[in-house]
Amino acid sequence: MIEHLGQLFKHLSCGVYVIGIRDGERQNAFTAAWVMQVSFNPPLLAISINPQHYSFKLMQTGGVCTVNVLSRDQYALAEHFGKPGLSDKMAGHRWQTAVTGAPVLAHSLAYFDCKVLHYADAGDHKIAVCEVVAGGKLNQGLPLLYALTGNMDGGDSFY
Amino acid sequence: MIEHLGQLFKHLSCGVYVIGIRDGERQNAFTAAWVMQVSFNPPLLAISINPQHYSFKLMQTGGVCTVNVLSRDQYALAEHFGKPGLSDKMAGHRWQTAVTGAPVLAHSLAYFDCKVLHYADAGDHKIAVCEVVAGGKLNQGLPLLYALTGNMDGGDSFY
């Protein structure tokens, strides 16, 4: 039994990202904080995601995603893309299309365009191990840090 | 082909940690940046580590580790525990023993005591998926961020 485990986990630093997903004509985007580099060669990222969510199904069938880095003045975007059940979350934002076909949030700091290689079990989440096949810097600014976003409850990626 | 991929990866925010390892009488500690929470229930962490290093063998055989969070004034510790091949890296620092038996760096901000559940392939690294079985806050301060440690080359965990 560990007291204040949620508080303890806040000592682990992480950024805040919008993950873009596409499977054919269907696309979606959601906010995540549990993202990190895991390999140099090939360049790989890991994203820990909740398999109960619609976006996970799209990722499984589409096999691609983008990781879009939010800046310190984009907390409102993190909140917006973190809301579940919106009928069209993506409307009203500027999107580009990555090499893989996944949507890129044009006003993010930078993006990584990824092919999902495989999944690993991780308790109530799944770790998607993704190869970075393209990417680029889009705008100037400093990354939003999860620890700075005190209004988010839990310390999780959220969808 | 992605230009400046190393620079691009620096947009992914991460902390800096000392990982403590024990297998019976053998113990070691090394610096890592590729650490994140991956599950709420059970509470799990993922650590991406280089399987070529001695510490990985100790982790495989011992099955336990601690994740010790460095503070912003502990850059020198990150450098020290990042050096390969030191005969006794751990001497001269204060250590406690976690529930699992793994060493806890007493002057870190906080620690997580972990059992390694399984490993996932991730290119030139392996992802260790670890259950947090104990932990606690040790000292006051703000976490060291990888992006602030400009002298580290590459953007990697390092051993």
Image (spheres, coloured by chain):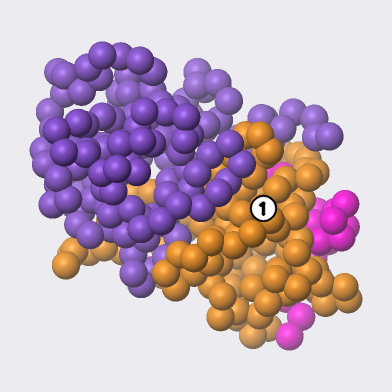
Chain colours: A orange, B purple
Residue A131: where, in percent of width, then height?
70, 48
- Location of mark 1 (residue): A130
Q: Which residue shows up at 42% across the image and 69% down it?
A: A123
- Side of B13 where A102 appears, left or right: right
- Side of B120 where A61 appears, left or right: right
Q: How many marks?
A: 1
Asked whether residue A24 appears in the rendered view, the answer is: yes
Q: Quadrant of the C terminus of chain B?
A: top left
Q: Quadrant of residue B94?
A: top left
The relative height of residue B71 versus residue A24 in the rendered view (above or below) is: above
Q: Which residue shows up at 72% across the image and 45% down it?
A: A132
For mark 1, name the chain.
A
- Side of A123 where B106 appears, left or right: left
- Taking the view exactly as shown, the residue that stands out farthest to the front is B61
Q: Quadrant of the N terminus of chain B?
A: top right
Residue B78: where, in percent of width, then height?
35, 25
The relative height of residue B65 versus residue B159 in the rendered view (above or below) is: below
Principal secondary structure, stretch drawn in magenta: loop
Q: Nearer the viewer, residue A71 or B85?
A: B85
Magenta stretch? A87-110
Residue B119: where, in percent of width, then height?
45, 52
In reply to whether residue A104 is colored magenta, the answer given is yes
SS of the residue under disc 1: strand
Q: Which residue shows up at 28% across the image and 54% down it?
A: B115
Asked whether residue B46 appears in the rendered view, the answer is: no
Q: Nearer the viewer, residue A3 or B55?
A: B55
The relative height of residue A144 versus residue B1 in the rendered view (above or below) is: below
Q: Quadrant of residue B101?
A: top left
